[in-house]
Image (spheres, coloured by chain):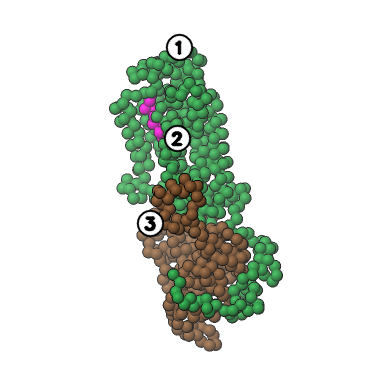
Amino acid sequence: MRDQKTPVRERRPRRDPNAGRLSAPGRLQAGDVAVMSPEVEGEPLAEYAVRHGLRPSAQRPTIPAYIRQLWRRVHFILAFATARNIAMYTEAKLGQLWQVLTPLLNAGVYFLIFGLLLHINRGIPNYLAFLVTGVFVFNFTQRAFISTSSVITDSLPLIRALQFPRASLPLAYVMIELQQMVLSMAVLAVIVIVSGEPITWYWLLVIPALLLQTLFNVGVGLLVARLGSQVNDFSQLLPFLMRTWLYLSGVLFNIATLDIRTYRWAVALLEINPAALYITLIRNALLQSQRLSAPGSQPYNAARCHIWQTAGHQTGATTAQLYDSAYCHYYANPDHFWYYGIAWAAVALAVGFYFFWRAETRYGRG
Amino acid sequence: MVVVDDLHIVYKVYGAGGDRGTAATVLLRVLGRKSRGNIREVHAIRGMSFIAYRGDAVGIIGRNGSGKSTLLRAIAGLLPPEQGNVYTTGEAALLGVNAALLDDLTGERNVILGCLAMGMTRQEAKDRYQSIVDFSGVGDFIDLPMKTYSSGMGSRLRFAIAASKSHEVLLIDEALATGDAEFRVKSHARIEELRAQAGTVFLVAHNLEEVEVTCNRVIWMERGQIVMQGEDVTGIIDKYIDASGGTPVERDPVSGKRLTAKVSVKS
């Protein structure tokens, strides 16, 4: 509330004829008055500023310059990721042990329910390994989504205190999730071996697959970071989006067993959606059972495919019947999966980066 | 060097009417396709123009809500202008009261992270680490999470981090207010150093003595506009105190130095 007297206004000195001259060191006299006109010695201030090589403070850098700035912050990104990771677990007694315990407990729950209580295989050989792989891989993308959606709000003090390319923050968050994912993969390897899968050279394919998924996550992370910073309702919506995506991506079941499988294009589309794609790439790398049973991995045989589609989906199907899926037609060509994987990563990265960069000067506002 | 050219800053405040959250009003708005009626615009800076040169330490004084912090954030490039523009030579670092870096982390990690964020290499950060810790004077607390720091210790560490690099423009928003006498002397010396390295320093402070000691120019703001500005720091501060209804400072008529030790402003 204004006080009744508003003494400041009354006492404001009258402008003298020299008003409008800017101060330079040593030029102003006592009691000189506010400068209202935006020019210095007849020259508009904007031109004056440009002539002296100044830049607008709220101007975003060009894309190449931005990438260079980001590159210089590589150490910052890594250190920030490590620091946040440590901070996340400082309150817990077991500390960073939780990084390993979380995936272990996750796997334990699935083993309890699907391995011991429900004997469900849904037409899939080695269902438990199939399921746990799917959950871990999907979790990587899901966690990256959810954590980056709040990265700008989480780091407001840092953003308001220091100038640095803001894309460092979502990048760091994805690095945190990547580190978590690598630990999960170690747990996963043990589970896969225990479930009876052999160790093969195919396992090495996990590395490029994870790399592509990480690039994809960085891309969508940048996208989601900007959305989350500008649309507050977005974080409310995100859990539902993620759950829908989970069910559409064949984490808990094989997409080819869905009732919509008569629409081959629909199944093919679901199979090449990024989450399903990266899950399939990693499953095929780790699980021999998946490699050998994937539709299209054997020449088409109508009779054996029929066995899988009928008997193979029943409880109590024999192992041979489960593997008969290999004799069905593929929906999306598995030979192209790596190309799709590269394409998704490239598109996500390009779109996400551009979208995030466009709003660079607006983060931390409000 | 900073050129502020006819700057206008407008905040959009959502939910000003206070009825935003209720389901009924939202539903009506969606059904009626009405635009959100309860956005209020706050015109925080209304047409300011000035130039601050290399080596200037500019004090900004004015009452609460006069737009001082908004002006600093605009200079730092954190608030896009509605009209006009701010031009600077280089990156500006803003130090505010609440600019905690990462509260959960130890002071040590904050120092390293802050240095890296400012674009230093790992080696540079390591090299400066000890001098930053010494400067901040937080001592053994450096191993503890920053949330355990007193507000004075936190601001000392933040200042030490930000001041470890010579910024072309350093903006200090009451960040020194919570420091003790010893720290004030140190930070004052550091600001002088930054000025000598051709930097420009802006200082928002309600402690007018601090402005008087540190700054060679002062801008008096009221309602987002400049009331007075100039190099006559003591003269403008005296007028500001006078206008705020405070007790005038007694000064030596020849040197202009304060005779009364403490400035008191009733407002």
Q: Residue at x 36, y 60 (%)?
A: B148
Residue at 46%, 49% in the rendered image: B29
Q: Amino acid at mark 3?
A: Pro
Graded by Cα atoms within 10 Å as few (under 14), some (14 to 19) or many (20 or more), the crowding at tag 3 reads: some
Q: Is residue B247 visible?
A: yes
Residue hosting label 1: A303
Quarter of the image where one finds residue A320: top left
Q: What label sits on residue B145 in the rendered view? A: 3
x and y, in percent, of residue A279 in the image = 46, 31
Which chain hosts label 3? B
The vertical placement of A103 against A36, above or below, is above
**Drawing shade for chain A:** green
Magenta region includes residue A127: yes
Using the image, name the chain to which the residue with label 1 belongs: A
Q: Colour of chain B?
A: brown
Residue extent of the magenta highlight: A126-137
